[in-house]
Image: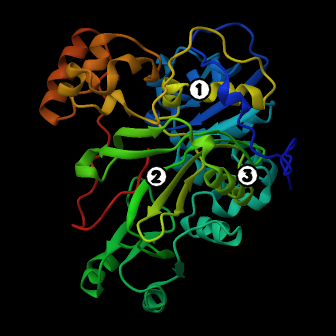
Amino acid sequence: MQKAGSDPGLSFNSAARYSPCGGIEMTDRATARALVYGRNRDLMQAVPTLLSRAGLAVTLLTADRQLRTCRNVSRFIAVERLADIVPRAAEEAASGYDLVVAGDDDTLRAVRLSGLGTEDKLRLLPICSEGGLGHIASKIGLSHALAEADVNTPVFAVAETPDRLPAAIAQIGYPLMLKADYGMAGNQVFAVESEADLEEAEVRLRYPALVQRRMEGELIDCSGFFHQRKPVAISLSTIIKAQNRGRGPSVYRQYVTHPERDAGLIAALQRIGRALDADGFVSLSAIRAKADGRLYFFEADMRPTTWVEHPKYFGADPAISIAAAYDLPPPSGKGAGTSEAETIVLGFLPRVPILDVLRNTANCRAHYENYCDRNFWFDRLADALNTITLRRVTNGIRRLFGLPPIYSGRRAAQTLPRKISLDAN
């Protein structure tokens, strides 16, 4: 079964990327509709602004009522329970949308494992046909899809049960990565240098599991937007600072300002688009191997990242490419910025330490609109306070002003000394 309108013959076209960068000025020219649904506020909050700038009227469906602060939403649908998100989204998507965006990994997995029919699943998932279901929220499925498409990916083996793990490890050899088939933000991902590290990891590992050769090199993010298997908006960045001593979500990234000039990267993304049957946002991660300098792709989460709007700050506005993909007029308004440099460092303001906000490191204060498109300065500073004590004080002050408390999230479990996160959010 194939999603209506899918065309496997499309190829990369970067012409839209050379257009002037659009700002966040809104008009009433929307001629297409987008449904954004899910539960993760951090991953979803920048998406309505991006899609509305591209010319789509956005419906936002979620159980997180704080997402009401997103201004660029035509319609907000609140559900009471997390379990209601997928069935309610399926009902809404059936009314007809040009683009449907699942906002996070848990929601993608919930759709895949739901009792919905194939047609309903295809409406909700960023894939063109039933053939793409196998890699949704599955590290094992992804590795098979990439390998079968001749995309560079680390050598791997699969252990369906604990008793098959020794044979899989013998096939790959040390050092290696052990990964449960599904996990988020580095959960169930373990670096194993030798047999001495194995016993502790085995206790916590869930099965089936992926056993992957560990590669030394630089972590690269190649996230972007695919339309009918074609990469239409891409970015290329490296994480230069992350939370939780480098194991958590990224705080600063160094972007390559013209990734479309890398012919090898574009060819790889074309193969990946076909391999994944991609039709929407993809959070794509790779390792640039020290041994040969090549990119080896190992992660493809079929949803947006928190950084989805940042390329506009150096003239690579994804709204322009998305608008062109849906035959919409280019965004209007003042451009957000251009850069003649080959690289540029940008920060994600809600994660930037308070001292860096005060110093305006990487011009981070200019990027406030990426955070739910709000510009209240107290919010910007308060969201940068990232210690428990300061957060409690800040939340007390916020309550005095009638503002919602800062979302603290769950701390990463410190279960293993060699547990690492390859989360590129």
Distance between the alpha carbons at the discs numbered 1 and 2: 20 Å
**Residue assigned mark 2:** 220
Three-letter code, disc 1: Asp
User: Considering depth in this image, is 341 or 253 the residue closer to the camera?
Assistant: 341
Three-letter code, disc 3: Leu
| In this rendering, position of residue 62 left or right of residue 396 | right
**Residue assigned mark 1:** 317
Residue 101 can be seen, yes or no: yes
Dot 3 alpha-carbon crowd within 10 angstroms: few under 14, some 14 to 19, many 20 or more: some
90 shown above or below 203: above
**Residue assigned mark 3:** 116
Dot 1 alpha-carbon crowd within 10 angstroms: few under 14, some 14 to 19, many 20 or more: many
Tell me which label, 1 or 3, sits earlier in the chain.
3
| In this rendering, position of residue 84 left or right of residue 218 | right
360 shown above or below 173: above
Three-letter code, disc 2: Ile
Q: Position of residue 350 (x, y in %)?
A: 33, 28
User: Considering depth in this image, is 359 or 65 the residue closer to the camera?
Assistant: 359
